[in-house]
Amino acid sequence: MATWAYPPLPPDRLNREADSALARELQWLLQSLQESLASLKEGLSECAALLAPQEPGSTLVLSSIRSESVKGFVTRVGTKLVKGDVQLRLQSLPPPRGSPSTRLTLSQSPESPDLVLQQLVSVRNLVNQSLDIIDVSTYTGDPHDAGFIFSQLHLLHETISEARQMLKGDGDVRGNWWETSVSDDMFDSPPPSNLSFHLSIADSALILLVRTLESNAIAQAPTAFASDISLTGFSLRDRLFGSRHKAHDEAGDVFKWKGEEVHVREKVRVESQDPSLMSVMAKLTALEHEVMRWVSALKVLMGNDDTESEP
C-alpha cells in the first residue's frame, strides 16, 4: 500500500489515513471470508461423503506385478473392508495338500470382528472436526473479529493438514505390522501361524504387505550341513562370490510377533489405487492451500509478524 499523497499530508495524519485504509481492507477481507467458509464447508462435505459407508463400495484388485505371489481382491465400504479373497503363492509358504496356493477369505459371519482401516477412521474424524471448526467460525463468536477468525483458520489448516498426512501415510500413522496385522479370527479359516497379513493406506492407495516369518532361534541355529559355517569367522561363500544381497529391506531384523522373536523370511508388497481416496486427497490438498492463503492474507492485514503463528 502506498503511503504518500499529494498535496503532502502531515506525518501523523498520513499514518492515521494508512491505518484507516488497512482497517477497511481487513473488514472487507473478513466479510469475504464468510463466503469462502461456505465454499470450504462444501468441499469438506464432499470428502465426508466419499468416506461414508455407501453400498456397493469400492472393489480393489490386489495382485502382485509380474508374479503369481498374490492374486485377489477386497471390497471397501466406508472405513471397513467387508469382503476379501486372496490367493498366496510364496516360496516360504507351502500350500495345503491338494491346493496350488494358500487362500485367505475374509469371514462373512456376523460373529467375526470388522476389519477396520484405522487411518480412514482418523481421516473421517478429522474431516468432521474441520466441519465443526467452520460452523464455530460461522455461527459462534464475532465473524468481524480478526483475531478470532485468524485462530479458527489456523486451527482449520492444522486439522486439514493432519487429515491429508494421515491419508498419505506419512510417519508412523500406518502402524507397526507386528502389532496391527489382520487377526486370525477375521478369516474363514485361520491363516498359517507364520503369516502376517498387514493392510494400510499410503498415497491414497490400499497397501497389502504379506510376510512369512521364522523363529529367530531356529534361524540362528547352525546345522551340520550348513554351507556357510566357518570356524574362523569368515565365510568361504562370501570370499568366493561376495556377500549375498538382502532378499528384502527387513532381512536380518528381529521383531516381536505373538510373544516370540522372529525374522522375516519373505515379504511381498501389493498396492491398489482407490479412486475415491484419490479424490479425497486431491480435495484436501486444494482446501489446505486455500486456507493457508486466507491465513497469510489475514496475517498481513493484521500486521502480525509472529512467525510462530504461521501454518
Image (cartoon, rainbow, N blue to C red):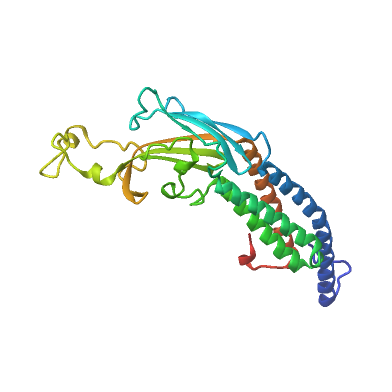
Residue located 10% across and 43% down the image:
231
Give the percent coordinates (x, y) of residue 191: 41, 37
Q: Nearer the viewer, residue 132 or 183?
A: 183
Give the percent coordinates (x, y) of residue 147: 74, 68
Q: Is residue 4 above or below residue 194?
A: below
The single residue placed furthest to the left in the displayed view is 231
Does residue 183 appear to the left or right of 214 in the view shown?
A: right
Q: Quadrant of residue 15?
A: bottom right
Does residue 221 appear to the left or right of 38 in the view shown?
A: left
Does residue 247 appear to the left or right of 129 in the view shown?
A: left
Give the percent coordinates (x, y) of residue 91: 34, 29
Residue located 58% across and 37% down the image:
82
The answer to whether any part of residue 172 appears in the image is: yes
Does residue 259 appear to the left or right of 109 in the view shown?
A: left
Q: Is residue 176 above or below residue 10?
A: above
Q: Nearer the viewer, residue 48 or 203?
A: 48
Quadrant containing the N terminus is bottom right
Q: Is residue 243 above or below residue 15?
A: above
Residue located 46% across and 44% down the image:
183
Q: Nearer the viewer, residue 206 or 297?
A: 206
Residue located 10% across and 44% down the image:
232
